[in-house]
Image (cartoon, grey):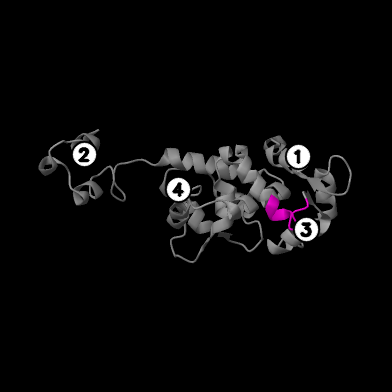
Amino acid sequence: KDVVSRILVAKPSERLTIDEILNHPWVRENGDAPDAPLDNVVLTRMRKFSAMHKFKKMGLMAMARTMTKEEISGMKEMFKSFDKDGSGTITIDELQKGLQKKGAKTTSEEMKELLKSMDVDGSGEVDYEEFLAATLAVNKLKNESNLERAFAYFDKDDSGFITVDELMSVVEEFKLGNQMDVNQTLSEADKDGDGKIDYDEFLAMMRDKGEYSGKRF
């Protein structure tokens, strides 16, 4: 209330300056402002991502790669707040310290599981695209254009279907070759059994909520 009331002053000479705002206890680094609510949201998204099957994670990775800068505004800064050494990846130590600093309550064991699940390519660390995929808001999955672009990312020849070869191409691109049985993955999403995934089947897979109860493909 203090900082807002001192900003909303009609007379410029009596209004807080930019430096005064940035140094106010509510705004400055390590000040009084708690940011646990933001962290709780991020941690909840990470937990949901952790429970998803691999194909859906790939779908979210494709979505992350095809979204506009406006759609992911602020996510890069959030990533940087975890990536303290500026390496471009987040280690388990950085993830744990970042969440603890902001008040998130979790165990070291859960941290290991979260990082393992977010680390889609199995590199041992989480890069920006993996972080983005793991922390996307649920409403992004309700946005038709986001889903269409993600589908198009798999559908390389624009045929309207995802074939085994196209799925394999993306699997290799995401460095998941030794982590997935491509034929089984496709057959489980291919509800009509025609050997390929159409947009409706892709949509059903991406919007399926079964992963939250432990269901896996």
| Quadrant of the snapshot with the C terminus | top right
- Say if mark 4 contacts mark 3, CB within 8 Å: no
In percent of width and height, residue 196 lies at 84, 49
Question: Measuring 56% from the left and 42% from the top, which residue is drawn there?
Answer: 45
What amino acid does circle 2 point to?
Answer: Ile
Quickly name the residue at label 4. Answer: 100
Residues 179 and 109: in front is 179
Residue kind at label 3, given as amino acid type: Glu
Depth check, front residue: 153 or 208:
153
Q: Nearer the viewer, mark 1 or mark 4?
A: 1
- The residue at which mark 2 appears reads as 7
Which of the two residues, 141 or 182, is positioned nearer the viewer here?
Answer: 141
Q: Give above or below for 51 relative to 181.
A: above
The kind of secondary structure element at disc 1 is helix
Taking depth in this image into account, of 184 and 74 the one nearest to the observer is: 74
Q: Which residue is mark 1?
A: 200
What span is in magenta? 152-159
Number of the front mark, 4 or 3: 3
The residues tagged by marks 4 and 3 sit, at their Cα atoms, a distance apart of 41 Å
Q: Label 1 to label 4, Cα distance in Å? A: 41 Å
- Distance from disc 4 to disc 2, alpha carbons, whole Å, reads 31 Å
